[in-house]
Image: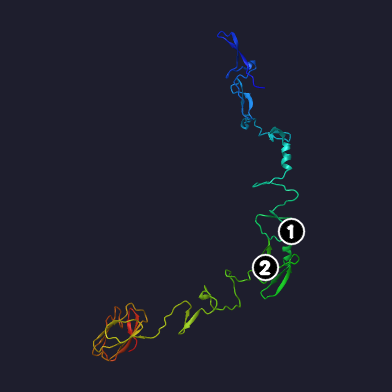
Amino acid sequence: MADKTPLRLVLDGNSDPSGLAEFQTGDTLPLSVGGLGASLSLGSAGQILKVNSGGTALEFGDVPVVDIDSATDLTGSTLIASDQILLSDGGTEGRVTLSQIDTLFSSTTQTLTNKTLTSAVLNTGVSGTAILDEDNMASNSATQLATQQSIKAYVDTELGNLSSTLTISDDSSTSDTVTVGTDTLNFAGGTGLTSTVTDNTVTFAIDSTVVTESSTDTLTNKTIDAANNTLSNIGNSSLTNSSITINGSGVSLGGSVDISGGTSWQAVKTSGFTAVAGEGYFLNTTSAAITVTLPASPTQGDEVTIIDYAGTADINNITVGRNSEKIQGSAADLTVSVERAGFTLVYADSTQGWLLKDK
């Protein structure tokens, strides 16, 4: 049957009926008399008929979305198995209980990827490529797990390969064996040495009879190899022989004594010079007289020897300069004018000065 066009009552300017006419586009019936209150066209697929935003008419529109943010806050509530939520089952919306969802997830196999399990409980057994059952641990993997049986088998094998005995030896190569688990290995001390065991640690201690680098000890009837040892900090007075005898006089170790080694003769002199104590001089006055100046600041026992080398002192004299000291008790220089003269002057003191040793 074809669609029909309804009729409407036409009113004149005084709102009096004047005739009938078909409904035109834009004509509507108000809601109060059973109309829609608006011109209505068929909506799109999936839309529903609803009241417009002004509350004055009906219109087609999309299914409203539930606004979770504005819904009642139940985050603080305790959920129970009979609580319900809305779901769509193949396009059919409806209510289901939480117990139904629990049954769904607990009775199906799930693959978890990149998940962290806290205080997880694994019942029955586990399997998969990450679980290895290798008695020899050949894979040596850093990411795979071993089964209890493979761990036990590996440990049993390794323990079986261990020797049950321990061989010990001393400095003389004498050896003995200790059976692990049954024998007791003793650490014995000796003369001046004791051993103690505390907290699995063996400690050896020496007593006062043992000489160490830092100990102070009295050695009796001991021989020290001086060629391979260094003795230091030994006082001279601590030695049995603490002095030596020189020319009949005792000299303590560490003391001093003057030992004359004789006259030190010098090359022939032909001109003046200053003598040195302990030296002897040959003076050649063939060409000219020579002046010998005695040492300054002499000490008792200093000697100077002079010899006329060419026998010409009677022609060109030898003069011995006193150098502020006296000669033979006189504050005057000594003149030698005897041919082939030879003599030695020895210093005595500031009173007599230099004295002739031989006359």
Quarter of the image where the C terminus is located: bottom left
Of 306 and 190, which appears nearest the observer?
A: 190
**Label 2 neighbourhood size at 10 Å, few (<14), some (14-19), many (20+)?**
some
Identify the coloring.
rainbow
Residue 30, position as x, y percentages in the image: 61, 17
Residue mark closest to the camera, 1 vs 2: 1
* Callout 1 amino acid: Lys
The answer to whether the residues at label 1 and label 2 have Cβ atoms under 8 Å apart is no
Which amino acid type is marked by label 2? Thr
Q: Relative to the observer, which residue lies in front, 257 or 153?
A: 153
Could you say which quadrant of the image residue 86 lies in? top right
The x and y percentages for residue 101 are 71, 38
Q: Position of residue 239 (x, y in %)?
A: 53, 77
Q: 1 or 57, which is in the foreground?
A: 1
Tell me, for residue 194, which label it has, or none.
2
Q: Is residue 224 above or below residue 122?
A: below
Write down the quadrant of residue 165 in the picture. bottom right
Reply above or below: 105 against 222.
above
Is the N terminus in the top left, top right, bottom left or bottom right quadrant? top right
Element type at mark 2: strand
User: Which type of secondary structure does the marked residue at label 1 adopt?
Assistant: helix
Q: Which residue is mark 1?
A: 152
Instruction: Please tell me which residue lies in front, 275 or 139.
Output: 139
